[in-house]
Image: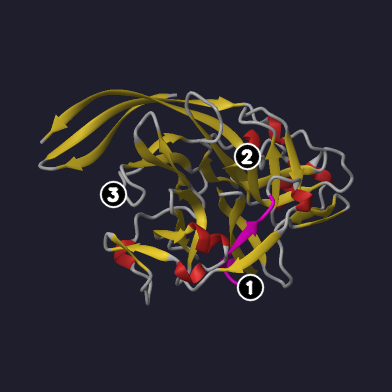
Amino acid sequence: MRSLLFILFVLPNIIFAQELKFSVTEIDNTCFKKDNYWRGADGAATVKLGNGKILWLFSDTFIDKEGTGKRSWSNTMIRNSIAIQDSCALNANLTFYYKGNPQNPEDFFKLPGKNWFWTGHGIMVGDKLVVFLFEETATKEGIGFEAVGWYVAVIDNPDVSPEKWDITYHKGINTFGVIVGSSAVLKDVNHVYAYGVKEPATHETYLFRIDKQDLTNGNLSELEWWVNNDWTDKVDEEPKSSALFIGQTEFSVHYDQSLKQYIQIQTYGMGKASVGYRLADHMYGPWSEPVMVYTPALKEDKEFVYTANAHPEFKSDGVIITYNINNGNPDRLIANEDIYFPKIIKLQFEEDKQVPSF
């Protein structure tokens, strides 16, 4: 696939159109299909750990208790799982983890009670791992579930096997329905930055920051919002005018060295959705209008595309992106192993000259 796009950004008195070419290549995703018990999940965010290892964070996960290697034998879905990839090579071996055992699997991140966690994004802060989680509850209306809050899980010993991780959970403060860390998490010298999306449904996106030590100590009351072009912790209601854009619940943001800009990746639309991106010079924007780069082919009427994320942790000559395909028909979801394993594409840019436009 090859296309031409124009991204507008503003400089004093001049609007420039930066002309870019891009190509999208589909990449084999069999690295997700080799475990006989772990038979697919959505979510698929990544965190670079020490020693060249990559952490994968997944949400709803099928487990085949019999180890047949077929999802059709899976009568169990847990709410989250993780995997460790041996190196920054995309096809490196994945080892999957969840609590309990294949015959009696349990969520990897879990607290007592009826609610459950889906995974947002995470980041290493010093020698600790921080994972943002959004708390979900079952409902009798709408789509059957609703986000009711957010947590952070702090892992003090991420250098050992996940089976031995020491996890401390900290409940997030009231952010007026915005799920902090449901999307991208970044850092600089002093702070961790987390994007959050208004749930349910409206999906205004905000940017937050917190001092690194406050975060790892669980002092989440020190969280600051980006409001009216400045940072503040004095927020008494959702600051609608400071929403960055309308985003999906899960998306990624990272600084792209070749573009010298931040790039945001997400899906756009419902059902036959497309993967697209926005660009900005700063984490807080202003963000360009979205550009669509890829529309996955769907084979059945009830299939739908969602949860697109970039994975800059992997060595590549382009942007590695995963997305997922689900099916609103549970029987077809279970039977069709071509879907509900993360799909992989590579987005490559070629920058041409800048053309001034008045």
Compare marks 1 and 3 and give the one earlier in the sequence: 1
SS under mark 3 = loop
Range of magenta residues: 141-157
Q: Do the numbered discs 3 and 2 sit on residues whose CB atoms are within 8 Å?
A: no
Amino acid at circle 2? Gly
Q: Is there any visible trace of residue 18 in the rendered image?
A: yes
Q: Main secondary structure of the magenta part?
A: strand
Residue 193 spot, x, y in % from top left: 44, 54
The residue that label 1 is drawn on is 140
Q: Do the numbered discs 1 and 2 sit on residues whose CB atoms are within 8 Å?
A: no
The residue that label 3 is drawn on is 286
Q: Nearer the viewer, residue 287 or 87?
A: 87
Q: CA distance from mark 1 to mark 3?
A: 39 Å
Front: mark 3 or 2 = 2
Residue 351 spot, x, y in % from top left: 32, 24
Q: How many numbered circles does the render carry?
A: 3
Amino acid at circle 1? Lys
The residue that label 2 is drawn on is 50
Q: Nearer the viewer, residue 233 or 298?
A: 233
Q: Is residue 116 magenta?
A: no
Residue at the (87%, 41%) spot, across then down: 67
